[in-house]
Amino acid sequence: MNSFRWRVLLGLAGWLAIVPAGAQQGTPHAGYVYPAGGRQGSAFKVLVGGQYLDGVNRATISGAGVEAKAIERIKPLTDDQIKQLKDRLKELTDRWKSANEKRSGGADQAEAARRAKWSAADDRAMAELKDRLANATRTPANPSIGELVAMEISIATDAAPGTRDLRLITKNGVTNPLVFCVGQLPEVSKKAATVEEERRSDGRSGYGRQAGGPLDPPEIALPSIVNGQIEPGGADRYKFKAAKGRRLVIAAAARELIPYISDAVPGWFQATLALYNAQGKQLDYADHYLFHPDPVLFDEIPADGEYTVEIRDSVHRGREDFVYRLAVGELPYVTSAFPLGGKLGDRTTVEVAGWNLAASEVTEDFKSLKGNKLEPGIYPLAAPAGGSIFNRVPFAVDTLPEIMEKEPNNNPQEAQKVKLPVIVNGRIDQPGDWDVFRFDGRAGEQIVAEVFARRLDSPLDSILKLTDANGKLLAVNDDFDDKGAGLLTHQADSRILTSLPANGAYYLYLGDTQHKGGREYAYRLRIGRPQPDFGLRVVPSSLNVEAGSTVPIAVYALRRDGFDGDIMLNLKSPPRGFSLSGAWIPGGRDKAGLTLTVPGGKSEKPFYLHLEGRATVQGKAVVRPGVPAQDMEQAFAYHHLVPEKDWIVRLTGSAKSTLRWKLVGDQRVRLVPGAVAQVRLQVWLFAPLGGFGTELGFVLNEPPEGVSIRKVRFGKDTVDLFLGADASKVKPGMKGNLLVDVFLRGAPQPQGDAEKRRTPISTLPAIPFEVLPAAPPRPADF
């Protein structure tokens, strides 16, 4: 084996090539949970729809006070199976009718004798068939939600209200997270959309139909949260009694529960709400609220009586994962707040407007949260004294000086003079309003002007313009794309980063691109020198890894105010055996592919990991946490980084993988255009690879253009990779990580196909690289 071609231990019976755990079954996926929440102090059953959910035994839910356990996996029945059940039930029903007729003496004796007898066993059989049909599930049209798991959820009375992450744990690993809500209102749930029903002749479906439908809407008491699912073409209706003058808030949560549905267009359930009186007259309608896809109705009841609320999809789509939570009642709902933030540690009085609020002001004093010192960021607004807030309202805190915008400041002559750095809290008070600010600057000085409005739930669609004292336009921006705000449907905040051309006065204009305005059109405007910084997103937030192996992950850098330095990554207090390779994001790069190596051995419980990044920013050491995120796809094309609460790793298999790898020597490879660089890896063979003619192959995973594997050399316990850099394609200064996949290459196909079968078996630890300038030609020897 000195050549170590790795046709290892050929012909040993019983040994098969090791395939990563889950490769045959696929990655466990959860598409929806229904109902998607419950009340404090309650226990109830939920259904989770997904794919590759074999062997589900429990779930993990973020935060304290919520427990979940699997009851059963429900397998959908085929149409033939359902037809057989219905035929059998009809046969039993006919016999039951005949038996009753016989006992009542309603038929002649000959006919009665012909009829079958009815027994206690028949009673049990009929009840069982009815129960099976009542709970029969039809196979969803989309395989990604084609499997069902029933779970029991228990919520403690002191569980904190709000959203959680729910993941199923299966024999093949952990699923992606789903949103699960803990509420405080009474809850009711429509029967899960799994019952095999007879289709109406007109093709319409729904729950509580009125117009043209036979069903009477179910009645709900106020306040309540109603859980439901919209089926194709369906419209769900609920009736309630309300007295004149009651100020009702009717709020739908749909996109909030499932942010993106990759195979639906638009890429989420677009709910609509309508309110009707007892005569069927529509009193109100909404298909969104401000810039949020989820609609909200605000209505003062005009007269005592019965009312009906309807929820459906705007384009009449529907299926099992069109899940909603519909809140109805006199709910304390904030529609606007001002200011949208304050200085960290200072007491800030916030004006709040809305429906059913206990007070019109809130006092905020952000210093610490659960005993931990707060960093600048966005936090939920507190409730008014003696009251509560139903909706979550964001409130920003920062360390810069803060002032209020002062009118009139609609033009350069009336511009409000500000001293930098500063955060201005203001409003676009009326349609067409412009707020103008004047500041003094110096030649070559860099200035950042950034609006925080849409990211703080303001409807303002801002635009920024910067001019010099003569009115010459220097910079303008409408929309700035914040990669950290993956749930915004419209990135409407503005940002300018520019260098000033000369000493003197400058004017910054802030307005609304749609020429709208009002009390709710609030903003926070930061003006000053750049404050370089960064944030991190770790993808994916759920990982299923074969014990003892190495897998690729991605870390995104959210660079701010021109920071372009290296970011070094590490695991914070990792469990034993977990490590990163290629743990850096090179300067100027917004994304790095790296690898995570996990320990051998079996573990039933998932591991919770924490990543952090370190960098030197303006001479100071800065540490930032890595926020777990899902790379979600919308409408087959658009990708969004959606933050999650936990980064979870589940070990699968039993450490029986064949190979373990370790980089030898310098961890960073230096590539020279036109030359070849050698990378040595130490390897351990834990189990033989089977199959005649089997050999190992190596391939770069999404490599930079111009970098390739030129040659592989096998040693006794090492592998050398020889990497080449094409001088016409690579540029000096290029940095990053190389990810290398390892596969088994089998014998050619019997038909003579020269392409050999490939079976992936592992990933090498990430190999950091840097491209150096080409060496100058050596003078000829004389």
Image (cartoon, rainbow, N blue to C red):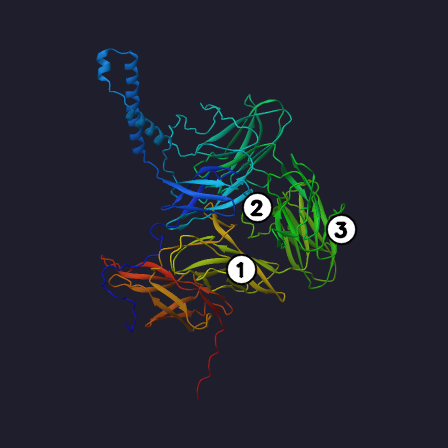
Q: Please tell me which residue lies in front, 371 or 390.
A: 371
Q: From this viewpoint, which residue is outermost toward the bottom?
A: 782
- Badge 3 or badge 1: first in the primary sequence: 3
Mark 1, residue position: 612
Q: Amino acid at mark 1?
A: Glu
Quarter location, residue 161: top right
Q: Is residue 36 above or below residue 421?
A: above
Label disc, if present, on residue 490 of the rendered structure: 2
Q: Amino acid at mark 3?
A: Gln
User: Gap between marks 2 and 1, in whole Å?
Assistant: 29 Å
Q: Residues within 10 Å of mark 3 (few under 14, many from 20)?
A: many
Determine contact: label 2, label 3, CB under 8 Å.
Answer: no
Q: Please tell me which residue lies in front, 406 or 602.
A: 602
Label total for image: 3
At mark 1, the secondary structure is strand
Q: Return the x and y of residue 18 as percentages of the image width and height.
A: 31, 58
Mark 3, residue position: 416
